[in-house]
Amino acid sequence: MEFNELATLRWLHIVCMVYWLGGEWGVFQTSYNVINRALSMGERRRHMETAYRIDILARTGIIMLLPLGIHMGNIWGTQPYGGAWLTFSWVFCLSWLGLCWSAFLYRETDTGIRLTKIDEAIRFLVIPALFLAAISSFLGHGPFNAGPGQLWYSSKVFIYAITLVIGLKLRFIMREWTVMFRRLAQSPDAETENILDRSIRTGRRLAYFYWICIGSIAYLGASKPF
């Protein structure tokens, strides 16, 4: 059987998109019970645990889309950097993914919070780099090719960077859950409940725009319209 590199990468890309979109929907639905004051604290914590377990699949998908997209872009000729650059992108993103999973495994601990903050710091570097690369490419300065039928790639990178911004805010919200539930476990109070409620409601509003962006990324990758 012949190994088809592009087909394999495309399949992995689809799987990551599915887990990304599906995972975000799962966290969205679970959040209703996380802030449901009619439930016991133990029951709410179980729903929060479920949300974390669903969310790690979405986080895995969104991180892995970056090296997959860079790799396929090189095959399609929309980005010219192969060889050592591809190797670096895979090593970097797999290391980032390992950090993300470590933060998940140590969730609700001080170590987990520290690891999550490192994950967030990486996003603060990756996000502007992607925006800069996409905008520079739109203007014809690279690093991505901007010939006829190639601008879809820079557009996809730009929207992907937007989703990382939204995802970063959602990461802040989920990290806040840990802090809020610690307070509630020690001494339940209405003020903390209200902060938690506002935080999650903000996340829900962002989620709608998030899904539009995810759908747009999928459309650009599938149709390559310009």
Image (spheres, rainbow, N blue to C red):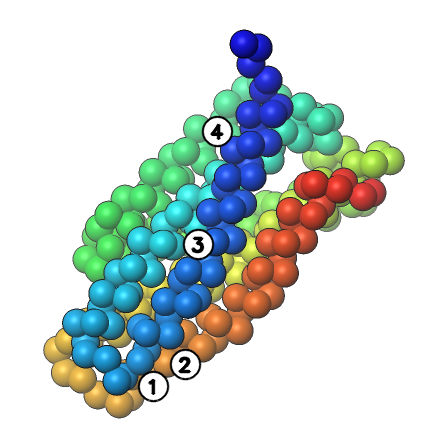
Which residue extends farthest front?
1
Which residue position holds label 4? 90
The residue drawn where x is 41% and y is 67% is: 29
Which one is in front, 20 or 91?
A: 20
Residue neighbourhood size for the residue with mark 1, other residues' Cα within 10 Å, grouped as few (<14), some (14–19), many (≥20): few
Question: For the residue labelled by badge 3, is the local secondary structure a helix, a strand or a loop?
Answer: helix
Sequence-wise first label, 2 or 3: 3
Q: Position of residue 112 (x, y in %)?
A: 25, 53
Do the residues under discs 2 and 3 have CB atoms within 8 angstroms? no
Sequence-wise first label, 4 or 3: 3
Q: CA distance from mark 1 to mark 2?
A: 6 Å
Residue neighbourhood size for the residue with mark 2, other residues' Cα within 10 Å, grouped as few (<14), some (14–19), many (≥20): some
Q: Position of residue 159 (x, y in %)?
A: 65, 52
| Numbered tag placed on residue 88 in the rendering | none
Which residue position holds label 2? 198
Quarter of the N terminus within the rendering: top right
Q: Label 3 sits on what residue type? A: Gly
Which residue position holds label 3? 23
**Mark 3 or 1: the one toward you:** 3
Which residue position holds label 1? 194
Q: CA distance from mark 4 to mark 3?
A: 23 Å
**Residue 6 in the figure: left or right of residue 119:** right
Quarter of the C terminus within the rendering: top right
Sequence-wise first label, 3 or 1: 3
Q: Label 1 sits on what residue type? A: Asn
Question: For the residue labelled by badge 1, is the local secondary structure a helix, a strand or a loop?
Answer: helix
Q: Label 4 sits on what residue type? A: Trp
The residue drawn where x is 22% and y is 65% is: 46
Question: For the residue labelled by badge 4, is the local secondary structure a helix, a strand or a loop?
Answer: helix
Do the residues under discs 1 and 2 have CB atoms within 8 angstroms? yes
Q: CA distance from mark 3 to mark 1?
A: 26 Å
